[in-house]
Image (tube, rainbow, N blue to C red):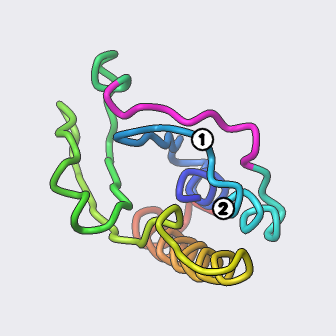
Amino acid sequence: MAEAFLNQTCGTEFEAHSAGLEPGKLNPVVVTAMQELGIDISGHPTKAVFDYIKKGTMFAYVITVCDEASAERCPIFVGVTKRLHWSFPDPSGFQGTPEEKLAFTRTVRDTIKAKIESWCDEVCPTACA
């Protein structure tokens, strides 16, 4: 979700890449929640963060969006000028009916979207839109 929102909101200034510690399949509830906003992430492959590290990929920012318990496992990227941590619940851990899981995921989605819009306004108020 964060990658899609960053590329949509700050795409003129940044190119966002998403990766996980243990990549797997896209969560279909997340795909549905994003489709509700007209953003199709269904074709996006999951990627491993360590693949970026092995390639020596350089980033101006690394933004982790995992919960606090997982944040300590996040690797360090060489040459990163800023590392930000935004703690959001992981939709894959939500319990309940499909409708309840979607409702929880919408809340996380909307919180991520608002955080990214606010951050983009701070970092590049005139260039991003």
Residue at numbered disc 1: 25
Q: Earlier in the sequence, mark 1 or mark 2?
A: 1
Q: In this view, does 96 lie above or below 76?
A: below
> Are the residues tagged 1 and 2 within 8 Å (C-beta)?
no
Residue drawn at 35 percent across, 61 percent down: 66
Quarter of the figure with residue 84:
bottom left
| Amino acid at dot 2 | Val
x then y, percent, for residue 43: 75, 37
Q: Nearer the viewer, residue 26 or 10?
A: 26
Residue drawn at 32 percent across, 67 percent down: 67
What element does badge 1 sit on?
loop
Q: In the drawing, does residue 77 fall left or right of residue 28?
A: left
Residue at numbered disc 2: 30
| Amino acid at dot 1 | Lys
Question: Magenta stretch containing residue 44, yes or no?
Answer: yes
Residue drawn at 55 percent across, 36 percent down: 46
The stretch of residues the image draws in magenta is 41-50
